[in-house]
Image: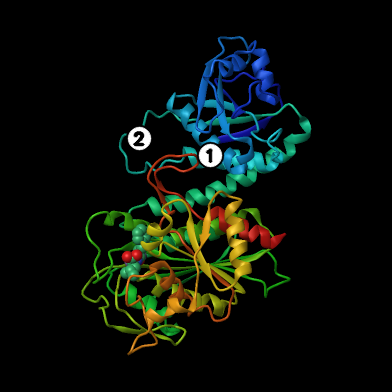
Amino acid sequence: MNIRVLREDVTKVKTPALIVNLFEGVKSPGGATGAVDKALDGAISQLIGEGEIKGNSREFTLIHTFGKIGPDRVLVAGLGKQEDFSANTVRVVSGNACRFLRNRSITSACTIAHGAGIGGLDPQSAAQAIAEGTLLGLYRFRQYLADNGDGKDLENLTIVEGNADKTAALETGLRVGRITAEGAMLARDMANEPANVMTPTRMSEVARQVADADGLEVDILDREQMEELGMGALLGVAQGSHQPPKLIILKYNGDPDNPSDNLGFIGKGITFDTGGISIKPAGGMERMKGDMSGGASVIGAMQVLARLRPKANVTGVVPAAENMPGGEAQRPGDIVRTMSGKTVEVINTDAEGRLVLADAMTYAKQLGVSRMVDIATLTGAIVISLGKVCSGVMGNDQKFIDQVIGAGDATGERIWQLPMFDEYKETLKSSVADMMNVGSNRDAGSITAAKFLSEFTDGVPWAHLDIAGTARSDSDKGHLVKGATGVPVRTLVNLALAEAS
Ligand code: BES
Ligand code: MN
Ligand code: ZN
């Protein structure tokens, strides 16, 4: 899809549809919407007066202009309350508006730069949010459909802005937004692929392609190399599958003068989670093809950083394996030795994410990361606690956790912190190994999982994102569509960009 900027009068531009906007409660629109209203002899304010247009979020009103002005149609998009307005409003409205137009087989449209006037956004952020909302909101995964729609898609979107001073900033915003959205869409594509295609090997090939295309260092460790490193926990998970595990490493070195400053992203890459011998119930198990979403988000974020080239050093590590109950599978009660030297009694083979992450975190520390975030669809319990509204975060360094939460806020990928009191560790005690991989009861399952991971941080400031509730969406809304969300690619990118500034 093409998105571009055009310097032109919104009332004169020739286009099948022009998207304008309205805050809730506004009776006579100003700015670009006001100019369009005036050119239409007050049609928009009349509809407001009659109560048909209220400006609520998710409200769309399509007005046909019958040759009165340049655009054939005007789509008035409600922005909701002005005090709630942010770049995320723009992202959500852009996604919804573009799907609205696509559903009406409109293939080309124009939009005003929402919020760049009265909304108080700078033009660059407004354009970035428009690009992200549009590209992510129109995303579809149709690779395997013989009948993939009517062939009509919204193919051109033009931001129309009369003020020449704003065009450069709008164009920069479009570029950043496109690159960021493409990273999130790469992560979505990987997670939407079925597990018979997106194997650990395939994941490593995608990572290699990204590295080759955009200039990242890449290293892929195979089973033998992991054996030499003593990654008993990761290998224990992988041994029940015929698919060989891969440890994927991507490095972006944007700040070579400060090599000791190195942000680590560690993403769970379980390409399918049957539960292993502690097998999961059949209902809904197909969703476990998305258990590599954390790893996919790391690869997506690394692609974005490679293209944006900020002044920061970032290392991505993805332990990729399939959790299957084959004849060689590990058993409940097995004791594995992690790369850190600590031993783990595997009580439940379905608590596999923490096992692969433990070795990946130890390896990341050995690679020299000075802070790390792990991203994982780790626990069903986080969905019970927080639903699908936000991801959970836990960690060992409040300042770093706050940075991660802040990076998420700016993107609309919301994050909520859970506590890490010492007492939560007690249920992980084993009588035969250094710890068990699950608590002795089901209490606070997301926190005990994080407590387990905290044993492998080795003094590095660390934040853990549990995305089990946010990695998929059940419906189309705003920039999200049904299926994989690409969360938290944009948060990770923001975190690295904040490092750079
Ligand atoms: N991949 C699952 C967690 C999950 C659940 C992700 C639902 C997405 C949606 C993870 O490996 C798992 O199975 N966790 C167990 C842990 C338990 C055995 C302590 C769980 O949450 O039930
Ligand atoms: Mn599991
Ligand atoms: Zn899992």
Residue placed at 41% from the left, 81% from the top? 426
According to the image, label 2 marks what residue? 148
Q: Residues within 10 Å of mark 2 (few under 14, many from 20)?
A: few
Q: Residue furthest right?
A: 165
From where the camera sits, is residue 174 visible? no
- Is the C-beta separation of discs 2 and 1 under 8 Å? no
Residue placed at 60% from the left, 45% from the top? 177
Residue 5 lies, in percent from the top left, at 66, 32
Which one is in front, 88 or 200? 88
Which one is in front, 492 or 453? 453
Image quadrant containing the C terminus: bottom right
Q: Residues within 10 Å of mark 1 (few under 14, many from 20)?
A: many
Residue 87 lies, in percent from the top left, at 62, 42
Report if the beta carbon of the residue with label 1 is closer than 8 angstroms to ligand 1.
no
SS category of the residue bearing label 2: loop
Q: Is residue 117 above or below residue 238?
A: above
Q: Residue furthest bottom?
A: 432
Colour scheme employed for the rendering of this structure: rainbow
Which labelled disc corresponds to residue 92?
1
Which one is in front, 228 or 154? 154
Residue 373 lies, in percent from the top left, at 54, 67
Image-quadrant location for residue 474: top left
Amino acid type of the residue that numbered disc 2 sits on in the rendered structure: Asn
SS category of the residue bearing label 1: helix
From where the camera sits, is residue 318 visible? yes
Residue 14 lies, in percent from the top left, at 62, 18
Left or right, 432 with respect to 230, comes to: left
- Mark positioned earlier in the residue sequence (2 or 1): 1
Which labelled disc corresponds to residue 190?
none
